[in-house]
Amino acid sequence: MTASVFFGCTFIAFGPAIALFLFTIARDPLRVIFLIAGAFFWLVSLLLSSLVWFISVQISNKESAPQQRGLLIFGVVLSVLLQEVFRFGYYKLLKKANEGLLALSQEETMPISIRQLAYVSGLGFGFMSGAFSVINILADSVGPGTVGIHGDSQHYFLSSAFMTMAIILLHMFWGVVFFDACEKKRWWCLVIVVASHLLVSCLTFQNPYYVGSLVPTYIIMFLMGVWAFCCAGGSLRNLKLCLTCKDKDFLLANHRPR
Amino acid sequence: MTTSDSEEDSYDERSALMSAETPPVPSYQPEQSDPDPSAQGPVLRRAKSSERGPGPEAELDEEEELTLKYGAKHVIMLFIPVTLCMVVVVATIKSIGFYTEKTNQRLIYTPFSEDEVSVGRRLLNSFLNSIVMISVIVVMTIFLVMLYKYRCYKFIHGWLILSSLMLLFWFSYLYLGELFKNYNLAMDFPTVGVLIWNFGAVGMICIHWKGPLQLQQAYLIIISALMALVFIKYLPEWSTWVILGAISIYDLVAVLSPKGPLRMLVETAQERNEPIFPALIYSSGMAWMVGMANPAEERRQQSDAEAQEAGGSLEAEDSPDPSAGAQRGCPSGEDQEEESGVKLGLGDFIFYSVLVGKAAATGGDWNTTLACFVAILIGLCLTLLLLAIFKKALPALPISIAFGLVFYFSTDYLVQPFMDNLATNQYYI
């Protein structure tokens, strides 16, 4: 417990996301704004789904544990679906705003491309989702206590941190694939994104049997990562060029000699 | 002011901006002395640039639209200080117990106690408290507008200097005391005396006279945080929420209605071509009047005044020449103007921080605090968007506080039980 667990879990959960933010988003004010707007949209979707869940709990039988569990599962599924609906809504809003601003600004190119928006909005969703899932847990990990004293799993904090990291990265990948699918009107891709999100959430119903939930989640995360990489224009060739520092376009853009 | 040709060539987004300098921004000051929180309605204003465009058309008065990039930069220039202020307040609330301890002391502006048993009575008392508070604020604002109209500058200066003295010395001394008590640090009076003296003296100089921009910004953020902490401690719970709501409505009315005191203040200042008191307003960039002899210095001295709670005022000033490095209080030649800055009144900082701090204080849930934080930032973003569209003084409180309140209550009552249940079972959405 206390400081080492707190810092360890915080860095596990938010490390990649914060690194991504610092290196790719922090410099550009426009991206920061769209990140925060994405976070806001996720928040609104959570609010609506909590409202529905809350109402359903009030009218249900509070004593019956299976019923409450069923309602919670219903809440999770509804929340996932609403998140994807809001992701679509955000996409539509960004398209409209981009067109409007392009008309307004008399410039020829949009200041931010739809792919960057996909990445940034996905990360915004991820940040907010991760933060809401894990911040209270992290705050509790600072204080005194014994994990799992009543017989629950001892790996609660660690597994939460790893799960959060996976979820944040997954949201980012889902964002990229989703927007790309909407741009190219490939609706089956959308269905796969929603289905994978549902799958990941439903896998967590097996917790505390972490092998059943964490391992498949990470597999799905890697697969989605590869898919998002391809959607964003990456390929094996690009990757090789990038890793051996021979990518001329990238080097030129960053003013570095080869 | 004229734009030099070179500006246009500099870079696209700049040229799209209203590069010409702007006509003097109206000076505006919300007043009030310290213990009062007379908050002024925040005012947003966009100074128009008079010219722009390629050389030959320099005389044309055009209003440039902000390009997206430039507008985004302004938004970030305000996000950062607002975030810093909120972080300071939340960190203090969560670590130092003093500011969340129940106290029977109340400010004289909230005379009705909330120790009632019945809900209806308590609600009634909080409404009455907010009525008292808002009336105090209205009276103070009108008093200030009168003073300003009849040119009693010395009185206003004196008042503002007194209030900033109190904030910088007394409140920070109390804060330091609580900090030491909390962490059980032994400290002697001479050391504290030296610390507070230095802190306060440098603060007075930076805020009322000249100093590096970032130091001035830091001091303004600190005094806003201190004031917000005082409110969080001494305002009773339900009254805080009602007051936040009421003050947003007051802000809306005071800034937008033709007879509103803040609008009159702004218009009077505009007529007289006077600058804003830098002390009451947080400015993200340096603003200078171009082409006026002895402009900055005089104006700065004249306009230095500080208010405890400055109402929010958001102004955007454009500067024609981004290349000139601006230093505060240094009236060099003409075309010197630096990046346009956007201005936000200190009252906005204070009330945003009160909202987030209160969210952090009541209940141990971090989700609520985070939700209020995001809601306020989005409200600020929307307000700045409106500022770019309407280009005139706008209140900065209503949208952000409305979002903040909605998200506070909904997250606290709806989202929190849901997330708690999910966390208990380790379900992820």
Image (tube, coloured by chain):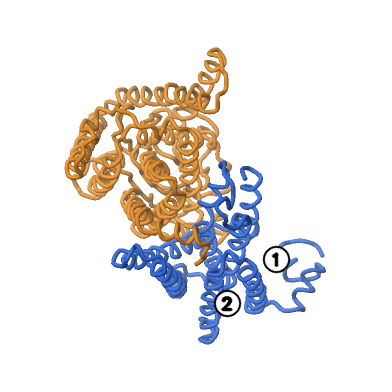
Chain colours: A blue, B orange
Up the image or down, B106 lies above or below A253; here it is above
Say which amino acid is labelled 2.
Val
Residue A93 in sight from this viewpoint: no
- 3D distance between C-alphas at marks 1 and 2: 25 Å
The residue at 64%/48% (across/down) is: A5
| Crowd band around label 1 with a 10 angstrom C-alpha radius: few (<14), some (14–19), many (20+) | few
Q: Which mark is residue A253?
A: 1
The image quadrant that residue A180 belongs to is: bottom right
Tell me the element at label 2.
Answer: helix
Tell me the element at label 1.
Answer: helix
Q: Quickly name the residue at label 2.
A: A177
Task: Please state the chain letter of the residue tagged with numbered disc 1 in the rendered image.
Answer: A
The residue at 41%/22% (across/down) is: B165
Up the image or down, B263 lies above or below A35; here it is above
Is B38 situated left or right of B121 in this image? right
Is B135 situated left or right of A208 in this image? left
